[in-house]
Image: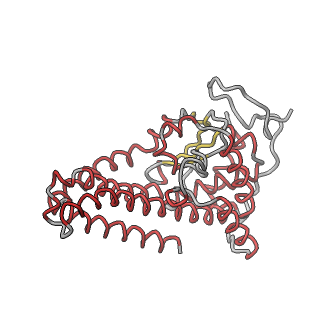
Amino acid sequence: MNYLKTTFLLTSMTALFVGIGFMLGGPTGMLIAFGIALTMNAFAYWNSDRMVLKMYGATEVDSRSAPELHRMVGQMAQQAGLPMPSVYIIENDQPNAFATGRNPENAAVAATTGLLRILSDKEVAGVMAHELAHVQNRDTLIMTITATIAGAISMLANFALFFGGSRNNPLGIVGTILIMILAPLAAMLVQSAISRTREYAADRRGAEICGNPMWLASALEKLQRGAEHIDNPEAEKNPATAHVFIVNPLHARSIDNLFSTHPNTKNRVAALREMAAGGSASGTTINIGPARAERSRIPSTGGQQRRRRGPWNKR
């Protein structure tokens, strides 16, 4: 169902680009705008993993520096039939996580120290399963295609008069100006709607990977409460990256629902609870085992942030 909705929205955005492109830029303007947008987003797609990880100061961990987290991700990657992704930890008090990478062979999953501090092992497993679902669903590619078309529409709007689009627009100069204003908003609406459908799809597939929808549902409730009260300075400085996180890092005050890249958390939790009640999580429940007391759940990443005790810091 989510794939059908995504396909419909992408088709709608493509039709919007063709229609608006012809009126604003004509055939030449359409090709120029699409070419520039494609080049920019192709570069971002190919380098997305390195760019976003560097932006947030993520530190790679392995089976020695973060044994429980690394083992957990490996178990779920195997369950999902995916290659083992790189695992990163971000020194940030806001509880959050994301996945990045142009394909499953070049994927990475990252969690903040805030997330590892407040979630139980099962909840962390639910979050990591959600991120692996994004990798398996190739959502980085889907959102890159979406961003390319949306970027081309915005570029056409910005240079409409330069392209001489008013000659192709039956509404004349006034119509051209109106479309210049409304077209980017329409593209942003569709882009945000596609992002929300991918989150629902990742929730569902993530529940199947870990085997228990309630692990993720419980995690989402805690993450939302944490994100509402704790700032993520890097995300605030780079709001274009907000869509990669499992919950919106920019706080509810920043974005109206129509333009939100994330579904309402209550709706996501309700869908997961319905899934659990219906027994539709077909995957085998991951045996994450007891947390080992002798190893730290939050390894040192060399940051300046003060370390606190958490569920994996028991002594």
Q: From this view, report whether residue 259 is shown above or below residue 171.
A: above
Left or right: where does residue 43 sit relative to residue 235?
left
> Vertically, is 282 above or below 34?
below
Residue 107 at x, y percent in the picture: 50, 49
Q: Nearer the viewer, residue 237 or 186?
A: 186
Vertical placement of residue 37 versus 58, above or below:
below
- The residue positioned 21% from the left and 55% from the top of the image is 160
Closer to the camera, 57 or 287?
57
Q: Quadrant of residue 277?
A: bottom right
Drawn side of residue 14 relative to residue 305, left or right:
left
Name the spot of residue 9 as percent of width and height, x first.
42, 69
Quadrant where the image shows the C terminus: top right
Picture coordinates of residue 228 (x, y %)? 66, 46
Residue that extends furthest to the front in the rendered view of this protein: 174
**Foreground residue among 57 and 268:** 268
Return the residue found at the far right. 315
The structure residue drawn at horizontal position 64% and vertical position 23%, both measured from the top left corner, is 304
Query: How many numbered discs, if any?
Result: 0
Q: Residue at x 73, y 28 (%)?
A: 307
Q: Position of residue 34 (x, y in %)?
A: 25, 56
Point 31% across, 67% down: residue: 16
The image's colour scheme reads secondary structure
The quadrant holding residue 8 is bottom left
